[in-house]
Amino acid sequence: MGKLFGTFGVRGIANEEITPEFALGIGMAFGTMLRREGREKPLVVIGRDTRVSGEMLKKALISGLLSTGCDVVDVGIAPTPAIQWATDHFSADGGTVITASHNPPEYNGIKLLEPNGMGLEREREAIVEELFFSGNFERADWRRIGGVREESIVKPYIEAIKGRVDVETIQKRKPFVVVDTSNGAGSLTLPYLLRELGCKVVSVNAHPDGHFPARNPEPTEKNLWELMRIVKALGADFGVAQDGDADRAVFIDENGRFIQGDKTFALVADAVLREKEGGLLVTTVATSNLLDEVARRNNAKVMRTKVGDLIVARALLENNGTIGGEENGGVIFPDFVLGRDGAMTTAKIVEIFAKSGKRFSELIDDLPPYYQFKTKKKVEGNRKGIVVKVAEIAKAKGYTLNTTDGAKIIFQDGWVLVRASGTEPIIRIFSEAKSEEKAEEYLNLGLGLLEEALRA
Ligand code: MG
């Protein structure tokens, strides 16, 4: 039996790997599982991002669900976190999202959700896989075939976020924000949310268009050079960019400087932990030590997991966590949505900015300084095996090691992480320290260990 799901859902080239037949099979497998769990007429929420292949796949997936006897709420185009929120909001028995997140436009994929909106648990994912490959589906008697109801969730989702921040304070400061939603699902929500919060909004790349004509939807520094120039040229307070399905939000300060996701995550975590007077922060081994400082000053604990948003979300749920996130601009507010939410993150950042009275660059520069380097090396073959070898060499040399995910060598003032990518033939090396020189030294040390492992 093949392995269907990656860390969160399945992805591939639309109409080659992710075909209508494939979507139909997933719909039937998911619906069959829900039926066999004893629900007479399960309710499933479905939504998608703006990709060209989205409608085709959605209709096939819906057919599969209806055939097994599920009822469907079709929320149309919406951010992934909004669909997660809606699954919980409608008290559905499950949810489905058609998206390939930040991948190029020719890709698409399917994510399945628990009733609480979180990605499907491993055990249930395995059941869906088994049903998909066996074709042992539940087919409803013709009288019991499901029905579809269409419902927009854009307004209630925006309202729900507005209810979680101090709108009055934001309206007083009236921040000037440039929004770049990459022609993705966030185009329908983020510019409107910001206006309703009381911001002055200029939006770019905000017409929904699955060709992603303006830029690569991954919000990296390289892909955001235009936004960086626009924010500065317009004299805006800051800029915010999203990926294709709007679960991530990445920020640009008023000088056009790209801000690493760790730093905005730290700002949000600091505010949330202060409001809740401590708690538990969950993040991955690839995120800055800045988060430990933020947790310490708020009397909060830190849990570090493997890399992956669903892994962080599960840890938050299981340990009653307060706030979670990753270094790539994904922040999870577990009492709102059990997944990364770019709009909620942006609303919180706007609130922090308005309350502080400071410039955006000052907010960032007031954080304890950490320097990071990131690089990657193309490696064919058994990447995980090579990383295990890196760990062995490091251990033999007497370094302090953490192997939660990859090989992380810990120093008094920093670390270097050597980790195999789950999706690409590369090994990533991240380093961090309190000074630029040390961070570079640790990066080179990681590279050296990798070279040694490759020769061994
Ligand atoms: Mg995404």
Image (cartoon, rainbow, N blue to C red):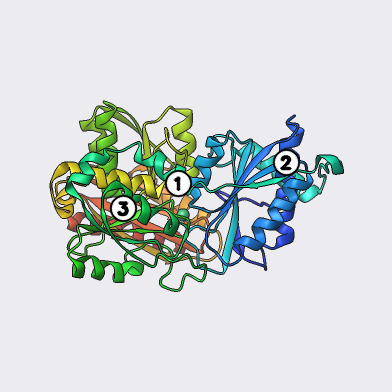
Label 3 SS: helix
Q: Which residue matches tag 1?
A: 155
In percent of width and height, residue 349 lies at 27, 46
In percent of width and height, residue 81 lies at 47, 46
Is there any visible trace of residue 267 in the rendered image? yes
The one nearer the camera, 403 or 355, is 355
Instruction: Identify the image quadrant of residue 130.
Output: top right
Label 2 SS: loop
* First reached walking from the N terminus: tag 2 or tag 3: 2
Q: Which residue matches tag 3?
A: 195
Is there any visible trace of residue 292 in the rendered image? no
Instruction: Identify the image quadrant of residue 145.
Output: top right
Tell me, yes or no, whether the two marked residues, 1 and 2, touch with CB atoms within 8 Å: no
Residue 118 against residue 234 in the figure, above or below? above
Say what amino acid the circle numbered 3 marks.
Arg
Using a 10 Å C-alpha cutoff, classify the residue at mark 3 as few (fewer than 14 neighbours), some (14 to 19) or many (20 or more).
some
In percent of width and height, residue 296 lies at 23, 32
* First reached walking from the N terminus: tag 1 or tag 3: 1
Question: Quick check: 352 left or right of 401?
Answer: left
Q: Give me the C-alpha separation between circle 1 and circle 2.
A: 26 Å
- Mark number, residue 373: none
Q: Give me the C-alpha separation between circle 1 and circle 3.
A: 13 Å
Using a 10 Å C-alpha cutoff, classify the residue at mark 2 as few (fewer than 14 neighbours), some (14 to 19) or many (20 or more).
many
Can you tell which of label 1 and label 2 is closer to the viewer? Answer: 1
Residue at the image position 31 percent from the left and 53 percent from the top: 195
Q: Which residue matches tag 2?
A: 70
In percent of width and height, residue 105 lies at 52, 68
Instruction: Identify the image quadrant of residue 69.
Output: top right
Residue at the image position 33 percent from the left and 56 percent from the top: 250
Tell me, yes or no, whether the two marked residues, 2 and 3, touch with CB atoms within 8 Å: no
* First reached walking from the N terminus: tag 1 or tag 2: 2
